[in-house]
Amino acid sequence: MDNSKIIIREANKEDCDQIVKLIQELADFEKMPNGPKIDAKTLRRDGFGEEKMFRCLVAADGDNLVAYALYFFNYSTWEGVNVYLEDLYVTPTYRHRGIGTTLWRKVAQVAVDRKCNRLDWVCLGWNKQSIDFYKSKGSINLTSQEDWNLFRLSGDNLRAFVNNTDKK
Amino acid sequence: MDNSKIIIREANKEDCDQIVKLIQELADFEKMPNGPKIDAKTLRRDGFGEEKMFRCLVAADGDNLVAYALYFFNYSTWEGVNVYLEDLYVTPTYRHRGIGTTLWRKVAQVAVDRKCNRLDWVCLGWNKQSIDFYKSKGSINLTSQEDWNLFRLSGDNLRAFVNNTDKK
């Protein structure tokens, strides 16, 4: 397909309304439509304000954003600074053109440029198509290979724990 | 047991040699003794230099560090800024005194103070004792409950992907 009009670039403040829509599309695909609570104002503040909490690349077809990769730096006590890829998403009508691979590779380039040894992310176990793609590039599933499980304390349980009112 | 001499405080530059030793102890416990490649110099630069990539709390008995909790802020496209707990470790002879709970609660307090809704971390699936403890405070296992799997592209595979030399 013709990718000649697709431009891959860093996101800017003005992209946030469209990025929020793509975030919702991704959540719908993940069968968790009620997940996103974020709005464009929050994204603008957190990504393009004084304290940058994430970075984002987008693929644009004219004025329309058709894909995004949102990432940040995290820290490993084994290897130091690494890159964590929070989201990689291509809207359905633009798939199978290599846009996702290009975005992913650019994030990997950021990691290598920063001398990071790791690029990490999470993926739903049923998403076999993505997993096959990741594995074809040498990625490993740390959950199935090393038994790492992801845990979360959130919302009311988080606040109860802090207030020490969680005791039964 | 007597906790009166134990002081919980923020880590400082001078703690890094001892923190590196505790990081190795944790890796030994996790049965991955060859995991840590980090040194105290790197920790000093990344945690206490110009760009702070992590924060760390320690428990000290006099001059000896006996526990640590190392964390940083990450970003969710569903909920914005959150806290990620990279390591929580108490050296064996100081366990069962509540030091781990105190450190964990202080990190949770950081999350609540920053208006984060989530505190995330990973744990090995065989570490039942820790998992039972986490669950007793309302934590959920996102891997078993929602099928989230952790993926990684690293080392030579990461560099080959960036250089586009991964094609077979």
Image (cartoon, coloured by chain):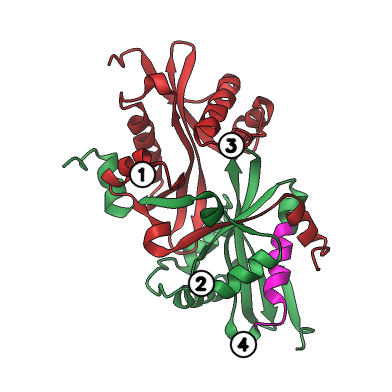
Chain colours: A green, B red
- The amino acid beneath tag 2 is Ile
- Measuring from the top left, give residue A168's x and y in whole percent: 16, 42
Residue type highlighted by circle 1: Ile
Q: Which secondary structure, mark 1? A: helix
Label annotation for residue A77: 3
Which secondary structure dominates the residues rendered in magenta? Answer: helix
The boundaries of the magenta stretch are A95-108
What residue is disc 1 on? B131
Q: Which mark is residue A167?
A: none
Discs 1, 2: same chain: no
Q: Please identify, in this view, whether the residue under mark 3 or under mark 1 is nearer the observer.
A: 1
Mark pair 3, 2: CA separation? 30 Å
Amino acid type at circle 3 is Thr
Identify the disc placed on residue A93.
4
Viewer can see residue B116 = no
Tell me how far mark 1 sits from mark 4, CA to CA.
42 Å
Q: Is residue A92 visible?
A: yes
Measured in 3D between alpha carbons, the distance from the residue under mark 1 to the one under mark 2, in whole angstroms, is: 31 Å
The residues tagged by marks 4 and 2 sit, at their Cα atoms, a distance apart of: 16 Å
Q: Are marks 4 and 3 on the same chain?
A: yes
Chain letter of disc 2? A
Confirm or deny contact between disc 3 and disc 1 (CB under 8 A): no
Image quarter of residue A94: bottom right
Q: Nearer the viewer, mark 1 or mark 2?
A: 1
- Above or below A55: residue A93: below
User: Nearer the observer, disc 4 or disc 3?
Assistant: 3
Q: CA distance from mark 4 to mark 3?
A: 41 Å
In the picture, the quarter occupied by the N terminus of chain B is top left
Which residue in the protein does label 2 denote? A23
> Quick one: A142 or A162, which is closer to the camera?
A142
